[in-house]
Amino acid sequence: MQEFYLVIALTFMAGMAMPLGALLAGVDQLRPTWLTDEYRHGIIAFGGGALLSAVALVLVPEGIAPLSTWLAAFCFVAGGVAFMALDVLLDRIKTPAGQLAAMLSDFLPESLALGAAFAVGESSGVLLACLMTLQNLPEGFNACRELRAATHYGARRIALIFAAIALLGPMFGVLGYSWLSAYPSVVAMVMLFAAGGICYSVFQDIAPQAQLEKHWGPPMGAVLGFVLGMVGHQLTMA
């Protein structure tokens, strides 16, 4: 029962990083020079580094353990194909919420995997929650900027919307904890599916946005985002 409430708390914490990122995106309304191009690109790259660390240190290692080689590869590729199909769909319908959709497509399967990880006794659940929080902060930041540019919504209103969306995290976490606990292979498949989708998103959306000519801060943002995940992984393994 204690793990049940821990799943709720951790997924809610990770989800609330989205409205916090939205509020940070609104700071430049008060201080237009606060976010220069290099800092903004650094924030984007930091989120990419955190996403890659979630893939490399948690989702793939935990996902491939109980599955055959070919099934694991299929699930990973299927995640990439699914995210690509979503990307194509969003482009065709010209939605102003592409970043929001990408954020949710990461957050929801990860919440499901987090709940399931606790149910099967994996020690990676807390680390995954921390990495989700790290990645949701810059993703909320980017999604808010996108929505502000395409709509009349202000940062506070968008942050409230994101706070409501954050409640989906505990719902999916509880679903993973209560339902997927009996199916460890399905848990692994969900993890690899999410990992494949995240890998696609990093190289399709995040890495190109992070590039900035004659500036070297953004790539270091990716390094710092990844190393935080690496340190967390080592601490949980100690």
Image (cartoon, rainbow, N blue to C red):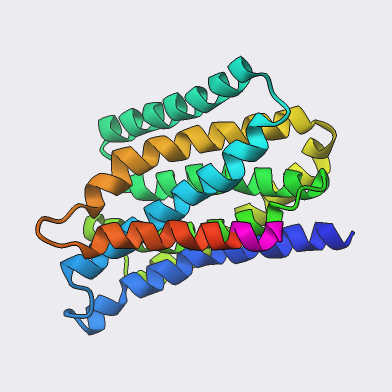
Residue drawn at the location 77% of the way across and 62% of the way down? 6
Placement of the N terminus among the 4 image quadrants: bottom right
Does residue 134 sit above or below 199 in this rendering? below
Does residue 24 sit above or below 208 in this rendering? below
Residue drawn at the location 23% of the way across and 65% of the way down? 217
Q: Quarter-wise, where is residue 83 in the image?
A: top left
Side of 3 relative to 29 (left or right): right
Side of 83 relative to 127 (left or right): left
Would residue 148 be seen by someone viewing this image from the given angle? no
Q: Residue furthest top?
A: 70
Side of 142 relative to 62 (left or right): left
Residue extent of the magenta highlight: 233-238
Would residue 141 be seen by someone viewing this image from the given angle? yes
Counting from the top left corner in percent of width and height, residue 33 is at: 16, 80
Placement of the C terminus among the 4 image quadrants: bottom right
Side of 175 relative to 228 (left or right): right
Confirm whether the magenta stretch covers residue 116. Answer: no
Q: Residue furthest front?
A: 238
Q: Residue furthest bottom?
A: 30
Residues 9 and 198: in front is: 198
Counting from the top left corner in percent of width and height, residue 104 is at: 49, 47
Counting from the top left corner in percent of width and height, residue 205 is at: 30, 43
* Dominant secondary-structure state across the stretch colored magenta: helix
